[in-house]
Image (tube, grey):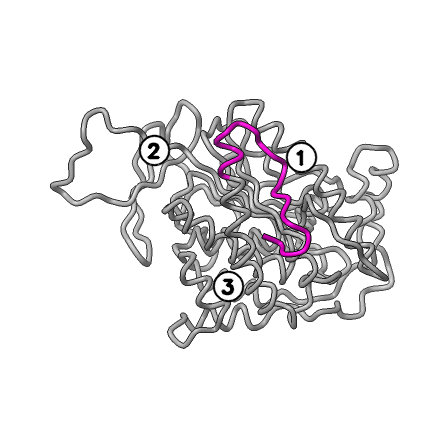
Amino acid sequence: MTGCPGEVLRILSPSRAATYIRIPLVSRFHWYPEQPENSVTPLGAPTPPSRGLVLGCGGTLGAAWTVGALHSLQEALGWDPRDAEVLLGTSAGAELVSLLGGGIGVADLLSAQLADEDARPELVRHFATPPRALPPRPALFPGSPPLARRALRRDAPTLAGLSGLLPQGRGEAHWLAALADFLTPPGQWVRHPATWLVAADFDTGRRTVFGHPDARPVALRDALRASWAVPGWFPPVRIDGLRYADGGILSTASADVLAPLGLDEVYVIAPMSSATPVPRRGLGRAEALLRRAMTRTLDAECAALRAVGTRVVRIEPTAADLRVMGGNFMDPRRRPTVLETALRTTRAVVRDSLAASSAGRQAPGHRPNARTGA
């Protein structure tokens, strides 16, 4: 959703009224809660920093961990993540920014993940019906030979090329389509006008940011399924004649998308990167290799943000988190334990990351005590 320069876009949230203002000089949005008629901003009062929120990929367990991290961040800052000027999400992160952009607060997300008695039933059902721990039997042909060939020519990232060689998935994303239909009328987008979902063109490896002013308008249900279309698990999603797959095959978070905006602060919550890897066995070694590659990519993206003067607060799993996650980030049986652990460990991660970024040290990630995870 965009407007003319200076145009004010007034939209009602399910929980509160809000006003969106497009700032033409830097092409960014502000989302301010509507003030009472008699409220006055004191002269000389400091202007709130402009903030972006980036939520990375991570499957079922990454989504649960991210909810815990969002809770810790909100508690530490006294800031509602829905007020970010830009909400950028990839895969499971796209699922969560869609919820935030649709007006669902962190407290509601946490309550639904915990299946509290007073939680919103639609959200409880959503989190209780994730994909199975293992994908259904895939097709007998690779998902994207053209993408694999481009990677061989170094015209696409290696991870994207390997993803193209995986057999095409046959999973169904009904739970995502149902979520999109709950959040928006058919064919529409969420209320927050700068909710951006990252996907990858599965034949060229080109990054596409649905919801971005430069992207063609699409329905939320299509963009969300595209961003979550894990190769080998789900088939690519066809939109306007092009096939799209999980944006995570290009980057765990695509945080550098926000660099041109000149934001004051960007908060990056990335469940698939880590400064404290743990030993893996069996198939878990593949997860460890994937995490290592994604961490390196995110290092470069955060450096790009800092290079334009943006303060970066990076929140990643600790060794304690990785131990309870295990090697399969889609295993729903581990979801309650992952969330419980995240609610404990991310307090320290957020505290230390905020302190490091404020001091200008910009540590690449919290390095906790290997024994306690704190």
Please indicate, yes or no, whether residue 205 appears anywhere in the rendered image. yes
- Quick one: label 2, few (<14), some, or many (20+) residues within 10 Å? few
- Quick one: label 1, few (<14), some, or many (20+) residues within 10 Å? some
Give left or right: position of 122 versus 288.
left
In percent of width and height, residue 131 lies at 65, 68
In percent of width and height, residue 353 lies at 54, 40
Q: Quadrant of residue 119?
A: bottom left
Q: Amino acid at mark 2?
A: Pro
Q: Within the magenta stretch, is there residue 364?
A: yes
Please indicate, yes or no, whether residue 220 appears anywhere in the rendered image. no
Give left or right: position of 232 versus 74.
right
Q: Are marks 1 and 3 in contact (CB under 8 Å)?
A: no
Q: State which tag comes first along the sequence, 2 or 3.
A: 2
Q: Amino acid at mark 1?
A: Asp
Span shown in magenta: 354-374
Q: Amino acid at mark 3?
A: Leu
In percent of width and height, residue 184 lies at 43, 58
Q: CA distance from mark 1 to mark 2?
A: 27 Å
Which residue has dot 2 on it? 48
Which residue has dot 1 on it? 299
Q: Residue at x 68, y 64 (%)?
A: 330
Q: Residue at x 29, y 46 (%)?
A: 18
Q: Can you say which quadrant of the picture contains the N terminus?
A: top left
Which labelled disc corresponds to residue 257? none
In percent of width and height, residue 68 lies at 51, 57
- Quick one: label 3, few (<14), some, or many (20+) residues within 10 Å? many
| Secondary structure under the numbered disc 2 in the rendered image | loop
Q: Please say if 111 is above or below 57.
A: below
Foreground disc of the pair 2, 3: 2
